[in-house]
C-alpha cells in the first residue's frame, strides 16, 4: 500500500520537485533514460549532474597521469605543449570547482532556494490550498508544453488536471472541468494502478462540481491507496460535508488534523466543521489561527474571508467588512470577498458601494449565487427591471455551468421557490436532497414545500436542518414563517425573533419580512400565572400515589 508524506502548504521559498524531473515513456515506446537534472525552470537553482561527475573524472585523470605507474618514481617528461595543456586543464577544473563550491549548499542547515511560479502553484494545489492566479497560469502552461513532448507522464497529467480544477474554482469557468476530467482520466489510463494523485484530483473535481457522491467515491479510493495523503483526506472531508454525513466528517477531520497539525489548511477544515455544528467560538478561533498561519497571499485571503463570513452570520457587518477588505488587500482577485463585501455594505447602509462591489464580483466570477443576491438587493430597492435582469442571469449561469458538469440545482431551486415556480423548485430540491442530504438542502426543500402549499411537510425538513446544521438566521426565519402559516403563533414569534437576534441583516428581502411578521403577530396574549395556577378556592385535584416498582421491598 502506498504511503506518502503529508503535503504541507509551502512558504514562498521552499523547494518543490517538478513533475518533469522523472518523465515516463509513452505507452508502446522504449523507456527513456532519465536525463541529468539541469537548470530548466526558475523553481530550482542547480548545476547539471554530469558537470560535477566530469569535474571528478578530470581531477582523477590529472592525478593519475602526474605520477608513475605505481604512484611514485620519476614522472615522464612531456613536451612544452603538453605541459601547457595540462596547466590549462587544471586551471579550468579549479575554476569550475570553485564555481560549484559556491553554489548554495543543499544540506539540511541551508535555506532552500525559492520556488518559481509553477512550483508555488503545484505545491498549493497538492496541499489543498488556494493558488495565486498568475502562478496557476504558469503551471498550466508548463504542464501543457511538457505533455505535448511526453504524453505518457501520468504524474504531469494529474498535476495538470488538478490545476484545471483550481482554475475553474477561481474563475467560475465551468469549461475547465471537462478539461480537468480528461487530464485526470488520462493519468489513470496511463497508470491504472496506485495512482493516488489522479484519484485525489477526481475527488476535488467532484467537490467543485457539487457532485459529492462522486467525490466520496474517488476520495475513498484515494485514501485506501495512500492513507497518509493529506489532500485525499481533505477532499473526502469536503465530500462528507456536502452529503451531510456527520460520522464521515468526524473520521475525515480526525485524519486531516492528525496528518497535518498546525497548518493553515488543517485549521480551515476544522473551522468549517465547527461552523457547521454551530460552534461559533471554536470556528472563529480555528479560522483566526489559520489566517495567522497562512503562508501565501491567496491562502491568507481565503482564511480572512471565512473569518468575515462568521462575523456576518452572527450579525456583525462592520467586523465582517473589515475582514473582507483585509482579504482583498491580500488577494485582489478573491471574488468571494468582493461579493460578501457588497452584502455587508448594503447592511450598513452604503447601498451604492454595495451595488458596485456586487457588479465587480460578477465581472470576476459570474456565479449564479452572486446574481441572485444582487437581484434581491435590487428588488429590495424597488428596482424591478434590474432585479429581473439578474434573475435571468441566474438561470443562464446555471445552464452554462451544467454544460461543464456543475450541479447548481440548489441555487436554482432556492430561486424558483422565492421568485419563480414553487412546484418546479420542489421537484428540483427533492431530487437534490436525495443525492445530498445536507442541512442546507433540507432547509431549501422545506421552504419550497411551504411555498407550494405543503407547510406541514416543509416544517419537518426545516426543523431537521435547524437540528443538524449551523446556527442560521435564514433557517430560523423559515421555521418561524412556516409555523405562523400553520397557526403556531407562540413558536412562530419565538423563532422569528431568534432569526433577527442571530443576524438582523441576514437578507435584504427576508429580514424585513421577519420584522413585518413579528409586528403582525403582536405581543403574546395575556395570561401567565393566572392561567397556570387554579383560581383561589378551587378544589385541588388529587394526584395518583406513586407505585413501587415490582420486586422492591420497603
Image (tube, rainbow, N blue to C red):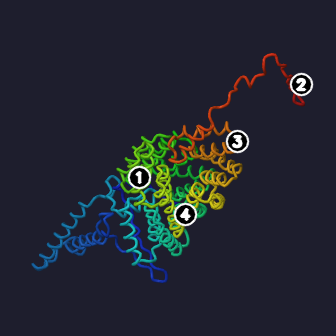
Mark 4 touching mark 2, by CB under 8 A? no
Which comes before the other along the chain, label 1 or label 4?
4
- Dot 3 falls on a residue whose secondary structure is loop
Q: In this view, does 149 lie above or below 270?
A: below
Q: Which residue is drawn at 52% across and 45% down?
A: 506
Q: Where is residue 292 in the image (x, y as percent from the top left)?
A: 40, 45
Q: Residues within 10 Å of mark 1 (few under 14, many from 20)?
A: many
Task: For residue 292, say whether it is visible.
Answer: no
Q: Residues within 10 Å of mark 2 (few under 14, many from 20)?
A: few
Q: Where is residue 377 in the image (x, y as percent from the top left)?
A: 47, 51
Which comes before the other along the chain, label 4 or label 2?
4
Q: Distance between the residues labelled 2 and 1?
A: 77 Å
Q: Image quarter for residue 412? A: bottom right
Q: In what quadrant of the picture does the C terminus appear?
A: top right
Residue lying at the far top of the rendered structure: 537
Q: In what quadrant of the picture does the N terminus appear?
A: bottom right
Residue at image mark 1: 355
In this rendering, position of residue 553 left or right of residue 198: right
* Disc number for residue 487: 3
Which comes before the other along the chain, label 3 or label 2?
3
Q: Which residue is drawn at 70% across and 52% down?
A: 454
- Dot 2 falls on a residue whose secondary structure is loop
Mark 3 touching mark 1, by CB under 8 A? no
Which comes before the other along the chain, label 2 or label 1?
1
Residue at image mark 2: 553
Residue at image mark 4: 206
Pick the residue in front: 339 or 230. 339
Of badges 2 and 1, nearer the viewer stands 1
Q: Distance between the residues labelled 1 and 4?
A: 32 Å
Which comes before the other along the chain, label 3 or label 1?
1
Q: Position of residue 365 (x, y in %)?
A: 43, 60
Amino acid at each position: 500500500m502506498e504511503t506518502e508524506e503529508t503535503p504541507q502548504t509551502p512558504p514562498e521559498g521552499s523547494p518543490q520537485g517538478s513533475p518533469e524531473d522523472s518523465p515516463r515513456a509513452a505507452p508502446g515506446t522504449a523507456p527513456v533514460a532519465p536525463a541529468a537534472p539541469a537548470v530548466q525552470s526558475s523553481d530550482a537553482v542547480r548545476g547539471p549532474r554530469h558537470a560535477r561527475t566530469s569535474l571528478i573524472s578530470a581531477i582523477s585523470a590529472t592525478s593519475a597521469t602526474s605520477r608513475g605507474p605505481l604512484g611514485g618514481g620519476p614522472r615522464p617528461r612531456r613536451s612544452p605543449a603538453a605541459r601547457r595543456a595540462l596547466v590549462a586543464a587544471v586551471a579550468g577544473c579549479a575554476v569550475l570547482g570553485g564555481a560549484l563550491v559556491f553554489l548554495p549548499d543543499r544540506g539540511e542547515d541551508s535555506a532552500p532556494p525559492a520556488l518559481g511560479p509553477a512550483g508555488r502553484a503545484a505545491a498549493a494545489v497538492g496541499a489543498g490550498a488556494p493558488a495565486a492566479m498568475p502562478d496557476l497560469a504558469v503551471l498550466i502552461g508548463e504542464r501543457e508544453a511538457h505533455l505535448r513532448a511526453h504524453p505518457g507522464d501520468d504524474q504531469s497529467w494529474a498535476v495538470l488536471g488538478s490545476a484545471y480544477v483550481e482554475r475553474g474554482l477561481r474563475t467560475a469557468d465551468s469549461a475547465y472541468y471537462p478539461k480537468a476530467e480528461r487530464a485526470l482520466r488520462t493519468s489513470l489510463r496511463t497508470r491504472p494502478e496506485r495512482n493516488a494523485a489522479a484519484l485525489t484530483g477526481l475527488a476535488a473535481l467532484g467537490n467543485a462540481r457539487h457532485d459529492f457522491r462522486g467525490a466520496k467515491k474517488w476520495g475513498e479510493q484515494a485514501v485506501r491507496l495512500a492513507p497518509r495523503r493529506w489532500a485525499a483526506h481533505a477532499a473526502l472531508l469536503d465530500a462528507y460535508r456536502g452529503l451531510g454525513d456527520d460520522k464521515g466528517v468526524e473520521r475525515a477531520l480526525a485524519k486531516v488534523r492528525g496528518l497535518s497539525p498546525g497548518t493553515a489548511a488543517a485549521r480551515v477544515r476544522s473551522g468549517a466543521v465547527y461552523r457547521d455544528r454551530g460552534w461559533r467560538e471554536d470556528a472563529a478561533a480555528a479560522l483566526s489561527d489559520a489566517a495567522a498561519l497562512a503562508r501565501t497571499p491567496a491562502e491568507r485571503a481565503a482564511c480572512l474571508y471565512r473569518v468575515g463570513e462568521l462575523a456576518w452570520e452572527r450579525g456583525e457587518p462592520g467586523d465582517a467588512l473589515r475582514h473582507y477588505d483585509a482579504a482583498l488587500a491580500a488577494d485582489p482577485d478573491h471574488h468571494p470577498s468582493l461579493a460578501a463585501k457588497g452584502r455587508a455594505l448594503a447592511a450598513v447602509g452604503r447601498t451604492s458601494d454595495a451595488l458596485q462591489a456586487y457588479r465587480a464580483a460578477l465581472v470576476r466570477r459570474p456565479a449564479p449565487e452572486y446574481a441572485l443576491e444582487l437581484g434581491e438587493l435590487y428588488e429590495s430597492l424597488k428596482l424591478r427591471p434590474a432585479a429581473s435582469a439578474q434573475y435571468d442571469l441566474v438561470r443562464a449561469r446555471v445552464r452554462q455551468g451544467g454544460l461543464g458538469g456543475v450541479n447548481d440545482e440548489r441555487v436554482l431551486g432556492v430561486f424558483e421557490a422565492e421568485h419563480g415556480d414553487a412546484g418546479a423548485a420542489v421537484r428540483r430540491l427533492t431530487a437534490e436532497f436525495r443525492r445530498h442530504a445536507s442541512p442546507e438542502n433540507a432547509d431549501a426543500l422545506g421552504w419550497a414545500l411551504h411555498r407550494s402549499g405543503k407547510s406541514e411537510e416543509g416544517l419537518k425538513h426545516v426543523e431537521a436542518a435547524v437540528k443538524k446544521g449551523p446556527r442560521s438566521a435564514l433557517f430560523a426565519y423559515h421555521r418561524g414563517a412556516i409555523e405562523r402559516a400553520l397557526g403556531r403563533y407562540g413558536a412562530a414569534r419565538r423563532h422569528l425573533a431568534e432569526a433577527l437576534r442571530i443576524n438582523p441583516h441576514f437578507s435584504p428581502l427576508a429580514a424585513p419580512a421577519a420584522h413585518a411578521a413579528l409586528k403582525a403577530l403582536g405581543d403574546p396574549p395575556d395570561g401567565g400565572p393566572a392561567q397556570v395556577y387554579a383560581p383561589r378556592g378551587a378544589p385541588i385535584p388529587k394526584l395518583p400515589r406513586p407505585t413501587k416498582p415490582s420486586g422492591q421491598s420497603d
